[in-house]
Image (cartoon, coloured by chain):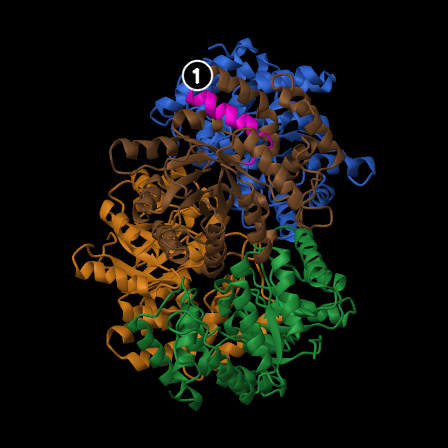
Chain colours: A blue, B brown, C green, D orange
Amino acid sequence: MKLTSAAHGTFTIAPTPFHEDGRIDEASIDRLSEFYGEVGCAGVTVLGILGEAPKLDAAESLAVATRFIKRAGDRQVIVGVSAPGFAAMRGLAHAAMDAGAAGVMIAPPPSLRTDDQIVTYFRQAVEAVGADVPWVLQDYPLTLSVVMTPAVIKRIVSDNPSCVMLKHEDWPGLEKITALRNFQKDGSLRPLSILTGNGGLFLDFEMERGADGAMTGYAFPDMLVDVVRLSKEGKRDAAHDLFDAHLPLIRYEQQRGVGLAVRKYVLMKRGLLPSDAQRKPAANLTAAARAEVDYLLSRVARVDKRAAL
Amino acid sequence: MKLTSAAHGTFTIAPTPFHEDGRIDEASIDRLSEFYGEVGCAGVTVLGILGEAPKLDAAESLAVATRFIKRAGDRQVIVGVSAPGFAAMRGLAHAAMDAGAAGVMIAPPPSLRTDDQIVTYFRQAVEAVGADVPWVLQDYPLTLSVVMTPAVIKRIVSDNPSCVMLKHEDWPGLEKITALRNFQKDGSLRPLSILTGNGGLFLDFEMERGADGAMTGYAFPDMLVDVVRLSKEGKRDAAHDLFDAHLPLIRYEQQRGVGLAVRKYVLMKRGLLPSDAQRKPAANLTAAARAEVDYLLSRVARVDKRAAL
Amino acid sequence: MKLTSAAHGTFTIAPTPFHEDGRIDEASIDRLSEFYGEVGCAGVTVLGILGEAPKLDAAESLAVATRFIKRAGDRQVIVGVSAPGFAAMRGLAHAAMDAGAAGVMIAPPPSLRTDDQIVTYFRQAVEAVGADVPWVLQDYPLTLSVVMTPAVIKRIVSDNPSCVMLKHEDWPGLEKITALRNFQKDGSLRPLSILTGNGGLFLDFEMERGADGAMTGYAFPDMLVDVVRLSKEGKRDAAHDLFDAHLPLIRYEQQRGVGLAVRKYVLMKRGLLPSDAQRKPAANLTAAARAEVDYLLSRVARVDKRAAL
Amino acid sequence: MKLTSAAHGTFTIAPTPFHEDGRIDEASIDRLSEFYGEVGCAGVTVLGILGEAPKLDAAESLAVATRFIKRAGDRQVIVGVSAPGFAAMRGLAHAAMDAGAAGVMIAPPPSLRTDDQIVTYFRQAVEAVGADVPWVLQDYPLTLSVVMTPAVIKRIVSDNPSCVMLKHEDWPGLEKITALRNFQKDGSLRPLSILTGNGGLFLDFEMERGADGAMTGYAFPDMLVDVVRLSKEGKRDAAHDLFDAHLPLIRYEQQRGVGLAVRKYVLMKRGLLPSDAQRKPAANLTAAARAEVDYLLSRVARVDKRAAL
C-alpha cells in the first residue's frame, strides 16, 4: 500500500545490521522486522542517514531495502533515496517501489541556499523519480545545512502532489510545526503527515504541537510508540513521565558520530542484533562509554522495565 | 586575583540584562551578581556568546564587564574578548584586566581550518592581549565550526603558559576530556582547568570524566553548583537524580536561537530579571513556548523546589 | 553630498595604510586621496573587507574614515559599517555621516540562509543606522556565503528607500545584472546604482550588461576609470584591449589572502604607499611572489605605460 | 600501464557527452579520445567533478570510464572514484582498474576538518580500493572546503606508497607547490607528480613553481599542452604570451556553475561535441553569454588560430 498523507504513528529508522567483517547481516534484518511488528510500529524507514546508507553500494542498498520490504508484514516501508545525482536516485526509487516500498524519502543536498534553489531541486527530484511515487520531504538543517521556512515547505507541497509527508527535524522546530498546522487551518496547505526525527529529543512537545508521530531510530521504538499513543490519548503527564525516564539516554544517543554506536550497542543488549558492528568510517564506543550506557539503562529501567537488560 | 589552572566549581555565564527599550539594565547586573554569590558560584563569565556580546558597542561591553567585576565579591570574573580583529580584542582585554577581571576568554574565528592555522591564531591572540593575561580557550565546534583535536589543544596549552583553562563544549566531547586527562597522567600536558559548557547537557558524565566544573548559563546555576559538588563527593546517584530532574528543561533551553529567550524568561520568573528583553536580532518566545516552559518548571519542581515559581 | 542611485563611475576600495610597526599611516591616506582625485575616481570606499576593517578598533575605524573624508575633495566617500551587531554598526554609521560621509556599505552576516532571514536582516540594519542614511547593499556570496537572488535584492530595495546602490560581486554574476536591469525595464524595480567588485575580474562584461561602474581596489584604479569610460562610450574593443592587458595581474591579485599583499606591494611600487605593511593576521609575499608580480607588471607595461615601475 | 610519480604533461579532464535527451553519447567519447591523442595529451581524467560524475548511476559511470579507456590509445586514463562511502568507491575503482585504467583519483569529503581526520580518511580509502591501485590525491579547498597543509600532504604521501600524484588546485596555491618541492629537496618527501587544476587559471606560474603539468578541462587542451611544453623548454615569454591570449576565456570559464556550460559550448563549436547538453541540474548559457563567448573566441583567435571557429 502506498504512503499517503494520512500516515501516522511511529516509523522507526532501521539500522543496517552488519557482521563483524562488514558483510550485511540479513538474518538480523528479519529479527528487527519481526520486533518492529511486535511493538506496534506503523512503518519502517530504511537507508536513512543513520542507516549507513552511503556506506552501501548500489546493489547492496537495493538488497537491504528489498529484505526489509519482504519482512515488513503490515508495516509500510519508506526507502531513503537521497543521492548526489538524479540518475542514482531514480534507479533506487524505481527498484524500491517495484519491490513493494510504500514511498521514498528525499533530503536536499547541502549546496542549496536560496528558497528558489530548494523549490527547484525538489521539482527536479520529482521529475526524476516520477510523479506517481509518494515521497517524504526530509527537513534536517542541523546536518544538511539547508534551511527551509514553513513558506518554502508549503510551496514544495503545493507544487508536488506526490509529497505526502514531512520528516521534521529542524532545530528548534516546535514553532515550525505550529506554523504548518496553522497553514492547514487557514486552508492554504493541503493535508500532510508530519513525523518528527532529531533522535526523538523533542518528541514530547512535538506531539503536542500537532505532529502525527515519530520517525527516528532511538533504540527503544516501543517507547516511541507508547509516547505517541499516550500523547494522542491526551494523557499528557503519563507521556512526559515515560519520555523523561528515557531522556538521559536519548540525550546520550544524540551525540554526533557516537550516536549510531550507542544505538547499535543497545540493540545488541536487547538481543536484536548479534553485533554492534558498523562499516568504516565509524566512531566506536570506548569501555568508558559502554559503562555509561549501561548505567543509563539501569536508571531507565527503574521506570521502564524494557530497559532492564 | 588572577585566574589559574586550579580554578574549579561553577562559573556561570551571565546574561546581559536589558530594559524593554534596549538600554542596559545595570540594577539587574547587581541583583544577578548577588544571587551568584548566594548560590555558591565560583566565578562569573561575562560577554560570552549567550551574553549577547556582539550586540554591544565597545563602550557598552566595557561598562557591562566593569559592573559585573565591581559587584563580584569573592567570585572571579572572566571576560569574553573574542573579536573579529586583534585591535578590538587587545583593547577590551586590557581594559577588563585593569578593571579587575581574573582573566579573559577567547574563541577561534570560524575561518580557521588546519591544525597549524588554529595554533597560529592563538599565538597571535596572546601577542595581542599580552602574555601576562590569563585566558580561557573556548572549544565550541558546533557553533564556531572550528575543530580542535586533543593534540592541538595540547600544543596551544604548551605554547602559551597564560592559557590556564579550557571551556570544553565539543560535542561529542566525553572522550576528549578523557584524552586530555590522560595526557596529564603521562606527563605530556601541564595542569589545566577544564570547565564544561554546552548548556550543561552532558554535565553529569563530564564531571565523571574529569571536568573541574561547569561554565554555562543554564537558568539554575544553583543546580549546576549542586551537581558539581555531589559529583566531586562521589555521590553518583544523587548527582544524576538532580541532573535528570532538570534535563527536560536543559534540553528545551538547548534549542538554538530560542535558548537565550528561555533562559531570560526563567530568570525573570525567578525574580532575577525584571524583563526578558533581548536586543535585536532576537528569537522571542511565543505564548505556546512560555506555557511549555511553565509546564517543564512545574515538573522539575516535583524534585527541586527551587523550580516552583 | 549624499549618495544617490545616480552614482556611477569608479569608486575605488581604499586600503588602510600602516607603518611597519602597525600604526595607521595618515600621511599615506592623504597621498592616496590626492591620487584618487588625479585619476578621475568618482568615489572612495573605506573600511571594506580588503581595507582590513576588522583589524581596527572602533576609534581607529572612525579616525581612518574621517581622514579619508576630509581629503576626499569632490569624491564621495562610502564607509563600510558591517559589524557583528547593530550597536557597533549604528555607532560607526552615525559618526561617519556626521563627519561627512556620502553613505555607508552593509554586508550580510554569514549566518543568514533563507530569503526571509536576509530581508529581515537588512530591515533591522536600516532601523539601526536610521532611514535617512543612504547605503550600499554588498552582495558577495563567495566570501560571505549568503546568496541573494535578484528577487530578494528587489525586495530589499523596495522595502528600504535608503538603499541606493548595489555592490555586485556575485560569482557568476553577469546574468544577475541583466535580471536586475530587466526588472527596471518592466517597472518592478526603481533606479539603483550597480557598481561591481570581485577585484574587477569580470568588469569588461559587467559594464556591457548594464553596470554603472566599478567598486573595487585593484592597484590600478586609473585603469578601472578608463575601462568604465571606454565601455560607456561604446568603444568595446578598446575597453577589452586595455582590460585584457591587465587581466594577468588582476587574476594574480584575485588569490585569497595573498591578494591584499599584492595590492599593497604594487601601490608601494607606484609610490603611493611607503610600505606594504599589513596588520596581523596577514599573508605576506615571498620573494618568488614579488618577482612574479614584477614580471607581470613588465608585461602590462607593454600596453599600459602606467605599469612601467 | 599504471600511473607512476613520473607522470607529466597534460591530463585533460574529459566532459561526459550527453545527447539532448540525457542519454550518454558514446560516439562523442570516441571523437574526444581521438582528439586528445592528436593534440598531445599525456592522459585523460574521467568522472571528475566537471565530468558530471554524480549525475551518472553506477553502471553508467563504469560504462563511460570503460569507453574512454578502450579508446585511449597511448594515453593513461585516470578515473575519479570519489564517493560518499567506501563500498561504492571500491566497486568503481576495482572495475575501472580491471578495465585498464592507469589509476584513480580521490577527493576528500567536505566533512573533514582536522589534520588527523584527513590523514585517516585517505588511509581508509586506500584500504578500500587496495594498496596496489595507484591514485591521485585531489586538493581542491575552494569547492570541497577541506584544507590540507603541505605537511598533511606529506603525511598522506608518506603513509600511502600508492599515492603517486597530486592534483593541485588550492587557491592560492603557488607557495604550496614550492613548499612541496622544497620537502623533496631536503629529502623529506619522495617523488610525486604534481599536476595543476583550477581550470588552468594559474598554470603559467604553477609550471614555473615546479608543477609537472596540467590536469584540467579547459576547452583548449591543445593550448595547455603547448604552455606546459614551452614552460618546460624555458621559453618563458612565449608560454605567457600564449597563456595570456587565452586568459580572458579561461577566466570566463572559471565561473562556478556556468563554467561547464561554457566548456561544452566551445567544444561544440570546435566540432568535438554535437551538443552542449548537460544532465540536470545544470546552468545553461543565455544568448547573451553565448555571444560573449563568441566575442572572446574571436579575440583569442587573433593570437591562436585554433580559436577561429
Residue B232 falls inside the magenta stretch: yes
Which residue: 52% across, 28% down? Answer: B224
Which residue: 58% across, 38% down? Answer: B33
Along the line of sight, which residue is nearer the eye, B308 or D78?
B308
Which SS type dominates the magenta stretch?
helix
- Residue type at mark 1 is Asp
Which residue: 48% across, 13% down? Answer: A298
- C37 up-or-down from C149: above or below: below
Q: Disc 1: which chain?
A: A
Q: Which residues are magenta?
A: B217-234
Residue A225 falls inside the magenta stretch: no
The quadrant in which residue D124 appears is top left
Q: Position of residue D280 (x, y in %)?
A: 57, 53
Quarter of the image with the N terminus of chain B in it: top left
Q: Position of residue D39 (x, y in %)?
A: 34, 70
Can see residue B218? Answer: no
Q: Position of residue D250 (x, y in %)?
A: 45, 71
Quarter of the image with the C terminus of chain B in it: top right
Query: Which residue in the protein does label 1 denote?
Result: A294
Which residue: 33% across, 66% down? Answer: D174
- D280 up-or-down from B78: above or below: below
Crowd band around label 1 with a 10 angstrom C-alpha radius: few (<14), some (14–19), many (20+): some
Along the line of sight, which residue is nearer the eye, C175 or C15?
C15
The quadrant in which residue C254 appears is bottom left
Can see residue A266? Answer: yes
In the rendered image, the residue lying farthest to the right is: A186
